[in-house]
Amino acid sequence: VFQHVPLAPEIPVYAVMAACSKDPSPLKVNLGMGVYRTEEGKPVMLNVVREAEQQLVNDLSAIKEYLPITGIAEYNQLSAKLTFGADSSAIKEDRVTTVQCLSGSGSLRIGADFLARHHHNHTIYISEPTYRNHPNFFLIAGFEVKYYRYYDPKTCGLDFQGLLEDLGSASSGSVVLLQACGHNPTGVDPTLQQWEQIRQLMRSRELLPFFDCAYQGFVSGNLDVDAQSVRLFVADGGECLAAQSYSKIMGVYGERVGALHLVCKTADLASKVEGQLKLVIRPMYSNPPIHGASIVAAILKDRDLYNQWTIELKAMVDRITSIRRQLFSVLYCRGTPGDWTHIMKQVGMFTLSGLNAEQVAFMTKDYHIYMSSDGRINMAGLSAKTVPYVADAIHAAVTR
Ligand code: PMP
């Protein structure tokens, strides 16, 4: 029956990871997949997550029944507050519908399917470049995917003019996917003033904002500061969607904890939207898992745990900032050709290094350094120990 099934293409980021794990070299460095590593190169486990899990151990082993389709109600409320702010008028006016989803990916997928059923315009604009999985969520839901200019390789910064021109010519009602902060893969975010200009343009052209919030807190270390882009759009009373993920910011990647928020014009619409979201979710996976969301809710609702979390989050951000400084200074001191200041200027987990596919292949072959072929470096995969070695490899790659 399955003879006709064609060989599927490899998924690049997983192929890089598989190649790295097969490599027996003790020198190997994995800068591919976007996961945080400690200074010792180990996967992260936040103390606060461990502590919350221990506190919950009795509850978690006692309750294994199904959750409602929309997930844990308290978790949803706490997640909405984290995204939109505790004093958000949209929340106070019951205009926000939140459903617990399988992390950021699941939230994007449910959001895309909902829009395919209930939004009149099936065109989505996505930044060029973007997180590689982004187009997939929308293509599978039947959207036409178009791109807006975002990154200027000449400045390694934002192509703001290009972005405004492209969104300015989008048809009314088009959906626009925006990364709230810590843009993957470029590490380039608009300033708050630029966000305001984007907001004005989008509202005047009736474009629907869909925020991807996978890195709230991962840029500045401050959860409110990193949510400013989203909150700007909510403060004007208009609609928007937001896909939230706890994978990176709490280091709960495999627990698949996230939420989809829809901000509506009225409480009545928010409640209708919730009903329709249930119809999207029910035939897909029926209801979400308990474990990870219970841990996240426990952290969000307890002042001590919350404070402990923000301290650990800030420590992750500080380590990445320090790595940026270290990599830049080694390249600078060595006189490696090129302007590497963007390593310092870019924010969040990633740097789009400017290395091309050929240079990346050389670094993999000769130095056992693994990263995506577009030159994206997961800065959190580096440490004080590996920075000089990786800088050697970059130097060799660009001076070949
Ligand atoms: N959005 C962005 C921008 C991401 O970088 C990622 C993960 N790399 C995701 C969404 C999805 O991650 P998750 O499903 O673990 O939340």
Image: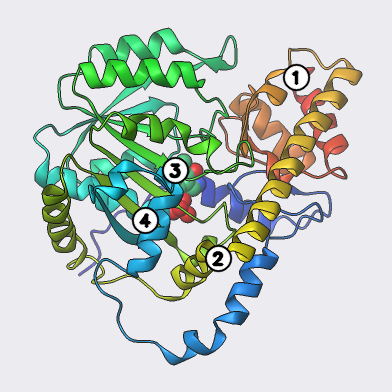
- Label 4–label 2 contact, CB within 8 A: no
Q: Nearer the viewer, residue 319 or 8?
A: 319
Q: Residues within 10 Å of mark 1 (few under 14, many from 20)?
A: few
Residues at circles 3 and 1 in contact by the CB criterion of under 8 Å: no
Q: Secondary structure at mark 3?
A: strand
Residue count near mark 2 (Cα–Cα under 10 Å), binned few <14, some 14–19, many ≥20: many
Query: Residue at the spot x=68%, y=26% of the render?
Result: 359
Residue 87 is marked as none
Per the model, the C-alpha gap separating discs 3 and 4 is 10 Å
**Please, what is the three-letter code of the amino acid marked with disc 1?**
Val
Q: Could one spot residue 11 in this view of the protein?
A: no
**Left or right, residue 361 beside residue 260:** right
As measured in the structure, the alpha-carbon distance from the residue carrying label 4 to the one carrying label 1 is 42 Å
Residue at the disc numbered 1: 398
Q: Nearer the viewer, residue 202 or 369?
A: 202
Q: Please report whichever mark, 3 or 2, sits nearer to the chain's N-terminal start.
A: 3
Q: Of marks 4 and 1, which one's residue comes earlier in the chain?
A: 4
Determine whether 262 is above or below 294 in the image.
above
Give the mark, 3 or 1, whose residue is nearer the N terminus: 3
Nearest to viewer (mark 4 / mark 2)? 2
Which secondary structure lies at badge 2? helix
Badge 4 or badge 2: first in the primary sequence: 4
Q: CA distance from mark 1 to mark 2?
A: 46 Å
Identify residue type, mark 2. Ile
* Residue shown at the point (15%, 34%) measured from the top left: 122
- Classed neighbour count for the residue bearing mark 4: other residues with Cα under 10 Å, few (<14), some (14–19), many (≥20): many
Label of residue 259 in the image: 4
What quarter of the picture does the C terminus occupy? top right
Residue 127 on image: x %, y %: 39, 26
